[in-house]
Image (cartoon, helix red, strand yellow):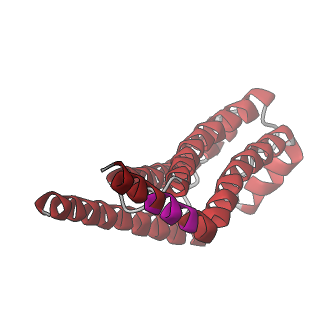
Amino acid sequence: MADFSDSVLLLEDSRLDSLRRRIGWLCQALRVALVAYCLWILVTISMFWSDESLVVSHFASLKVDVEGMTAYQRLAGFGVSFVIWTLLVAACYAGWRLFSGYLEGRIFTPDASGWLRSLALMGLIAALVDIAARPLMSLILTAHKAAGAHMVSVYLRPEDLSTLMLLATLLALAHIQKTAADIADEHSQIV
């Protein structure tokens, strides 16, 4: 009996080693990319909000005059950006856990679909909060202006739609993967 269980364990180890050879480099690369992306975005928003002339020129391109804003207004703008960044970090953490699970051989499993779902949901929330925060951001940055000069700027960028569509697709794939894992579990219990 011990020989049979040892054979099964060796077969499972062999399959896991084969899987790691095929997708291990990709999973590791994506995990590194997730960390790099979080750090890059944090550095980018920090540099943006610390440079008043950059903030002024960016909002001028959106037809919002923020000239003369205070350091506290820029700090508030950074705070809004930081909240969105924390949502991105949560999405990236879910991605890290997803690819870590893949490395451990958990691919079409309920926990893998759960991490994929978390990644998609946190990404969708971050994208929607970013879009919703834009009018708030313009209001914060024009708060120093006279009462009639406050601006509420509402706009969408072309990449907003593609980002939302991609994340919605990932959410649908997570649902499909969860359903497939549930069906496979039911079949294994029958056999």
Task: Say which of 22 and 142 sits in front.
Answer: 22
Q: Picture coordinates of residue 85 (x, y %)? A: 62, 43
Q: Picture coordinates of residue 176 (x, y %)? A: 30, 67
Asked whether the viewer can see residue 44, the reply is yes
Q: From which residue to which does the magenta span run? A: 11-18
Asked whether the viewer can see residue 135, the reply is no
100 lies above or below 173? above
Task: Say which of 191 and 164 sits in front.
Answer: 191
Is 65 placed left or right of 182 in the picture?
right
Q: Report the residue at 79% width, 30% height from top.
A: 70
The outermost residue toward the left is 190
Q: Quadrant of residue 20?
A: bottom right
Q: Please, what is the dominant secondary structure of the magenta stretch?
A: helix
Quadrant where the C terminus is found in the figure: bottom left
Q: Picture coordinates of residue 56 (x, y %)? A: 81, 49
102 lies above or below 126? below
Q: Picture coordinates of residue 103 (x, y %)? A: 55, 56
Task: Say which of 102 and 5 sits in front.
Answer: 5
Task: Say which of 127 and 54 sits in front.
Answer: 127
109 lies above or below 94? below
Q: Report the residue at 48% width, 69% height from top.
A: 166
Q: Is residue 17 magenta?
A: yes
Task: Please tell me how many numbered marks the rendered image carries.
Answer: 0
Q: Is residue 32 magenta?
A: no
Q: Report the residue at 72% width, 32% height from top.
A: 73
